[in-house]
Image (tube, rainbow, N blue to C red):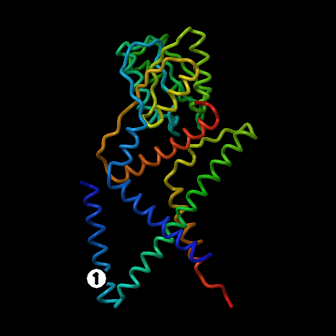
């Protein structure tokens, strides 16, 4: 039930955004397609950061365990905030990467 | 380079979006957990081994995972499946020893103090397999009922089986296929971590 409500909510607000974009803002349909593609690029970069964060984190934890008497749990990586952090990293880096160089 | 990178990112982003929708809005994570969960028919053993589970909170209370496992172990003990209840759990950052907090709960729930063995040195499943394994061997125990969460049971049982124990897997729960998207995302996170741990244990020769 909750997932149907959330999906319905997302569909409804997306539809409203579409109508506002097409009507009040005068946006075109082809630019919507390119916006979706751009959004996928941003999400893709964030996923890349998530994979890198997990891999580097795992390596560091195992290195600390092996090389020092300190014990770090692998479950330190089992935290939802890592997804949020990776999302911000991906958005910033991909926006930076896509900017044309100065001069 | 830039066009190829952008295309690769689009594919990755689209795949992640589809995966997110499938995970959040279908029973896929719970189905994965069920697939990973080993459940054996219960039969008498010589000890019930309750593995550590996320420790003790800052206020000295057991975490949800630890509490669930402990209660499950106590219930199995009261069903007379084994005369010995092994409670594992290391010391927390705040100085609480999970195994001792569990012991207090078990005695409060009617488990005889002499039937409880606590182990506080194991910090990983493999550690627990080695330390508890040695203690049980000294008591000539060969068959155990093992208590852990569903998704980690396969790996935990394999650690003890490799040490020569006859393991009866008694996971704390089998997940329902219902639930809100947030719960499903959490379930997938735990499954992903467990898969990583399983790969690590395989690569290290622990199982």
Image quarter for residue B3? bottom right
Quarter of the image with the C terminus of chain B in it: top right
Q: How crowded is mark 1: few (under 14 residues within 10 Å), some or many (20 or more)?
A: some
Side of B49 relative to B75 (left or right) = right
Q: Mark 1 lies on which chain?
A: A
Q: Is residue B70 above or below residue A58?
A: above
Quarter of the image with the N terminus of chain B in it: bottom right
What residue lies at 68% left-to-right and 48% top-to-bottom? A60
Q: What element carries label 1?
A: helix
Question: B144 or B162, which lies in front?
Answer: B162
What residue lies at 29% left-to-right and 56% top-to-bottom? A3
Give the residue furthest to the right.
A67
Report which residue position mark 1 lands on. Answer: A19
Give the residue furthest to the top.
B140
What residue lies at 46% left-to-right and 70% top-to-bottom? A40
Q: Is residue B19 above or below residue B169?
A: below
Please state the horizontal and vertical placement of residue B43, each as a whole percent of the image.
Answer: 38, 15
Side of B204 relative to B58 (left or right) = right
């Amino acid at each position: 039930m909750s997932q149907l409500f959330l999906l319905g909510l997302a569909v409804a607000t997306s539809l409203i955004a579409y109508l506002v974009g097409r009507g009040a803002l005068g946006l075109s349909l082809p630019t919507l397609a390119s916006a979706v593609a751009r959004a996928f690029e941003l999400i893709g970069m964030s996923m890349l950061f998530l994979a890198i964060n997990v891999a580097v984190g795992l390596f560091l934890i195992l290195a600390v365990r092996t090389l020092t008497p300190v014990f770090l749990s692998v479950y330190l990586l089992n935290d939802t905030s890592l997804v949020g952090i990776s999302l911000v990293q991906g958005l910033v880096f991909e926006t930076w990467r896509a900017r044309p160089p100065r001069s | 380079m830039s066009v190829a990178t952008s295309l690769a990112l689009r594919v990755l982003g689209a795949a992640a979006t589809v995966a997110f929708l499938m995970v959040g809005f279908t029973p896929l994570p719970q189905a994965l957990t069920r697939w990973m969960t080993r459940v054996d028919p219960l039969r008498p053993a010589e000890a019930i081994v309750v593995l550590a589970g996320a420790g003790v909170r800052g206020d000295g209370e057991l975490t949800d995972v630890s509490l669930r496992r402990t209660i499950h172990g106590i219930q199995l003990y009261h069903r007379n499946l084994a005369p010995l209840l092994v409670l594992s759990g290391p010391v927390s950052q705040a100085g609480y020893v999970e195994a001792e907090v569990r012991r207090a709960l078990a005695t409060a729930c009617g488990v005889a103090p002499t039937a409880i063995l606590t182990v506080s040195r194991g910090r990983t499943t493999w550690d627990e397999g080695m330390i508890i394994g040695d203690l049980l061997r000294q008591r000539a125990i060969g068959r155990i009922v093992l208590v852990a969460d569903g998704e980690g049971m396969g790996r935990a049982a394999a650690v003890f089986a490799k040490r020569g124990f006859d393991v009866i897997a008694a996971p704390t729960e089998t997940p329902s296929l219902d639930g809100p998207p947030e719960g499903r995302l959490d379930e997938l996170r735990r499954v992903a971590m467990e898969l990583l741990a399983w790969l690590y244990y395989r690569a290290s020769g622990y199982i």
